[in-house]
Image (cartoon, grey):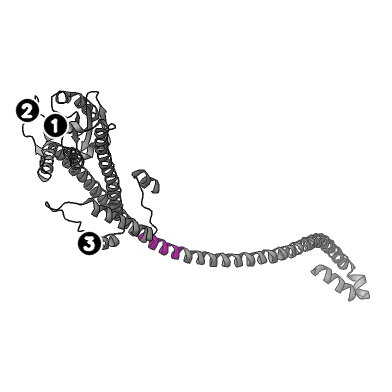
Amino acid sequence: MEKLALFFTRIKELRFWQRVFSWSSIRALSYEAYEQYKKIESDLNVKQLSIEDLRNRITRLETEKSGLEIKVQDYDKTFVQKDNQVVNLTNKIDELNEKVSELKNKVSKYESTEEDRTTDYEKKIAQLDQVKKDLDNERTRLNDERVKEKENEFNKMKKQWSEHESTVEQKIKQICQTHLIKYEEKVPFRGTPDNAIQICDEYIIFDAKSPANDDLTNFPKYIKTQTDNVKKYANQESVRKDIFLVIPSNTIDSISQLTYNMGDYNVFIIMLDSLEPIILSLKKIEEYEFAEQLSPEERDNICRVIGKFAHTTKRKIQIDQFFANQFIELLVKCKNDLPKELLESVIEFEKAEKLNPPTEKRTKQILTKELQDKNDSINAEAQIRQIKIPDSFDEVKRLE
């Protein structure tokens, strides 16, 4: 640039004499200036190219910028959307946090409640176990009591059976003593019956029979065998052809047949309670001066009365046994089913009660008229109260 500038300065200051005498130097300077110009032109071309390249780059960059601005706008829109989503998600997270907090509180309350429930449950289970244990103990105690009662009852029954023969003998002797009937300690004929009484010059045999053990299965067969064995008494002279086998009252249910017609003689199965009415019926024969004066019809009437006594006595015992069983079951139900407080109150009332049945005096006779009058009074009171009195044991069961 210095040569070119110097050349233009010399040209502008050129004078005539300078053109004549200094042209060669000016010409040389022009060459140098031209070379410098070329160089400058070349540099300008290079710079022009560079500028064009820069412009192209600028254009390209502006295009890219436009694209980037569009993308930025898109990104801005996306960012706004994302920001909205973030806000929404943040709100949802806050809501979820609130729900989580609420659920944590509920879980905490539930755990606390569940712990109380578990404690209460365990306490109730412990109480239930104790109640079950008490019930098991009570059941065991009741079973033991029942077993003991059964054993006592059975032992009492066995004792009754073992003492049955002496009990029958004492009962017959007492009846004979009370009603002035002769009891034969030793009979004048062959054989040794358990008991024999004499009425109208006839010996009436009462043999006591009881089971050999606690198994009543073979007892009916044993009784049937004894009806054959007493034939040795029936064949004796002056022995009445009606022979009585006295069995314990608690074995009557095992006996299906109570009367045996053996051809030459009859055998009647009776119980201890039947002795007195039967013996008294037989004693009625003494009202006749001579036994041979009795007609067959009169003898049949006497036998019919005796049979009626025997049947009525046995039915009375069956009814008493039936109601005794019902009362025992009722007492057991009261003991097992009533609440403890009520049962204690019942026991107190029971202790306060007392039954005083009429006492029996040896010298005082029980008059039939008094019994009939009492029965009429009871029937009249029942009619007033509209209470139906059953006529038979079967009707009692039907009314139930």
Q: Which secondary structure, mark 3?
A: loop
Which is more toward the observer, 79 or 400? 400
Name the mark on residue 202: 1
Residue shown at the point (26%, 39%) measured from the top left: 305
Q: Is label 1 or label 2 in front?
A: 1
- C-alpha span from label 1 to label 2: 12 Å
Q: How far across and down, in percent of the image, does residue 167 sit?
A: 12, 40
Which is more toward the observer, 104 or 137? 137
Q: Are marks 1 and 2 in contact (CB under 8 Å)?
A: no
Disc 2 target residue: 188
Label 1 crowd (10 A; few <14 / some 14-19 / many >=20) = some
Q: Is label 1 or label 3 in front?
A: 1
Label 2 crowd (10 A; few <14 / some 14-19 / many >=20) = few
Does residue 28 show up magenta in the picture?
no
Which is more toward the observer, 63 or 164? 164
- Amino acid type of the residue that numbered disc 2 sits on in the rendered structure: Pro
The answer, for residue 308, to whether it is visible in the render is yes
Which is more toward the observer, 198 or 224? 198
Disc 3 target residue: 353
Find residue 118 and report its image quarter.
bottom left
Q: How far across and down, in percent of the image, does residue 56 sit?
A: 81, 60
Q: Are marks 1 and 3 in contact (CB under 8 Å)?
A: no
Q: Quadrant of the N terminus?
A: bottom right
- C-alpha span from label 3 to label 2: 54 Å
Q: Which residues are magenta?
A: 107-119
For marks 1 and 3 on the same chain, the one whose residue lies earlier in the sequence? 1
232 displayed left or right of 86:
left
* Residue 360 against residue 235 in the figure, above or below: below
Q: How far across and down, in percent of the image, does residue 98 sit?
A: 54, 67
